[in-house]
Amino acid sequence: MNRNSNIGNKSLYLLHDGIRKAYKADNFGGIKSLTEAMAYRPSNAMALYNRGILKGRIKDFSGAERDLTACLEINRSMYYAYFYLGIARINMGEIEKDIQYYITAEKDITIYLSFVNTNAKAYYYRGMTRRKISKNIDALKDLNISIEINPKLDLAYLERGLLKQSLYKYNHGVEDIGLAKKLGNKEAIKYLKQLD
């Protein structure tokens, strides 16, 4: 066996080990294995993708953004990376209070949705992002689609309710927030208690 196949086998083993650890919620162990896999194959898009997701799980959103961006630079056809890249940027926008992250996140999730148009959470995230950047009509459309795909997605009802209230449709907003509460959304429960 030659040196290159040994390196390829070791890299593949570490990639699978990192993914296995991710499924067991061993985020730090998974990151370690995926980082080691990349030492053997630095342009391993799959390792970058999975490490980016794990970094997002541990709230290292800038690290997630770096890995997922690098993944897409290596392999643009890994469109599912756009979804997680968008989520990382939404979280960075929350932390940094910078609207540019939301604008970029909207673009990332739009690219993802051009490939997969049945993901209720993707429509929810894009709707939430669009509300943050004052694209309210588009946000409402996305949240409606999200709820149509998954009528039990409590986050979408809460977000749509908050959006409707900001559009001066107070009663309709409270109704949606009430539906989120019925589905067990804790923020909706807290919000409605404040109104009593």
Image (cartoon, grey):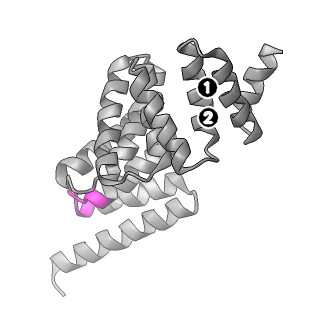
Disc 1 residue crowd, few under 14, some 14–19, many 20+, Cα 10 Å: many
Spot the residue most to the bottom: 1
Residue 42: in magenta span: yes
Indicate left or right for 50 with 161 as reference: left
Secondary structure beneath label 2: helix
Nearest the camera: 130 or 145?
145
Disc 2 residue crowd, few under 14, some 14–19, many 20+, Cα 10 Å: many
Instruction: Tell me, yes or no, if residue 103 can be seen here.
Output: yes
Secondary structure beneath label 1: helix
Nearest the camera: 127 or 41?
127
Disc 2 marks which amino acid? Tyr
Indicate left or right for 192 with 2 as reference: right
Nearest the camera: 116 or 15?
116
Quadrant for residue 126, please give it: top left
* Mark number, residue 76: none
For image coordinates 16% across by 75% down, the residue present is 4
Q: Position of residue 117 (x, y in %)?
A: 38, 51
Numbered range of the magenta stretch: 38-46
Q: Position of residue 87 (x, y in %)?
A: 43, 38
Q: Is residue 5 above or below residue 160?
A: below
Residue beneath label 2, please? 157
Q: Position of residue 193 (x, y in %)?
A: 81, 20
Spot the residue most to the right: 196
For image coordinates 76% across by 39% down, the residue present is 182
Residue 90: in magenta span: no
User: In the rendered view of the protein, which quadrant contains the C terminus?
Assistant: top right
- Whole-number angstrom distance, CA of label 1 to CA of label 2: 6 Å
Tell me, yes or no, whether the two marked residues, 1 and 2, touch with CB atoms within 8 Å.
yes
Quadrant for residue 155, please give it: top right
* Mark number, residue 161: 1
